[in-house]
Image (tube, rainbow, N blue to C red):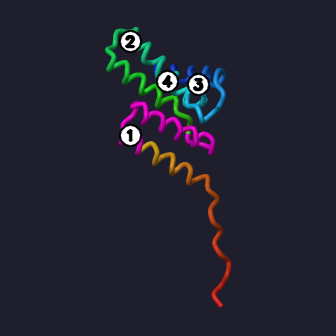
Amino acid sequence: MTDIAEIAETAAGNAEESRPNNPAHPDEHTAIARCILARQRAFGKALACGKSDFGASIDGNQAFLHALPPLSGFDNIRDYVACLTYAIAAGVISNQIAGVLLEGAKVALATLRPHAKPSLRTAA
């Protein structure tokens, strides 16, 4: 496992233990908190290893993306979108990358919708 993936995994456990899930306050939303914590830890670790602020930012942003919830189940998809929205606002990812990732969320969400049953009526 890479350092960034390890940081994201550790952040996941810590964020879920320490924060309530309150979408009204992003700093209190578990999924967003997990992603932010992963970003902060990767950034700090990169700086400690002698990377520049720019290099540390790249590592932090990658850790944020590694910490995104999986696109399975309605709650995870909702949290994924919340994290991406935060990432756009915070400048973690570009609008272009966000657009691609949000398209993935849209497809995942579409797979959860019940499919309409075909009509069995016949023309009279």
Nearest to the observer: residue 22 or residue 44: 22
Marks 4/3: CA distance? Answer: 11 Å
Q: Could you tell me which secondary element the residue under label 3 belongs to?
A: helix
For the point 45% across and 48% down, the residue is: 103
Rounded to the nearest angstrom, the CA distance separating label 1 from label 2 is: 25 Å
The residue type indicated by label 3 comes to: Ala
Three-letter code for the amino acid on which mark 2 is drawn? Leu
Percent x, y of residue 29 = 60, 31
- Dominant secondary structure of the residues highlighted in magenta in the image: helix
For marks 3 and 2, give the CA distance.
Answer: 21 Å
Q: Which residue is label 1 attached to?
A: 97
Q: Amino acid at mark 4?
A: Ala
Query: Residue 5 — which label?
Result: 4
Residue at image coords 42%, 31%: 90
Q: Is residue 88 magenta?
A: yes
Residue extent of the magenta highlight: 71-99
The label shown at residue 12 is 3
Q: How far apart are labels 2 and 4 at the CA level?
A: 17 Å
Give the image location of residue 114, x and y in percent.
64, 59
Q: Tell which circle, 3 or 2, labels the residue nearer the N-terminal end.
A: 3
- Sequence-wise, which precedes: disc 4 or disc 3? 4
10 Å neighbourhood of mark 4: few (<14), some, or many (≥20)?
A: some
| Mark 2 nearby-residue class (10 Å; few <14, some 14–19, many ≥20) | some
Residue type at tag 1: Ile
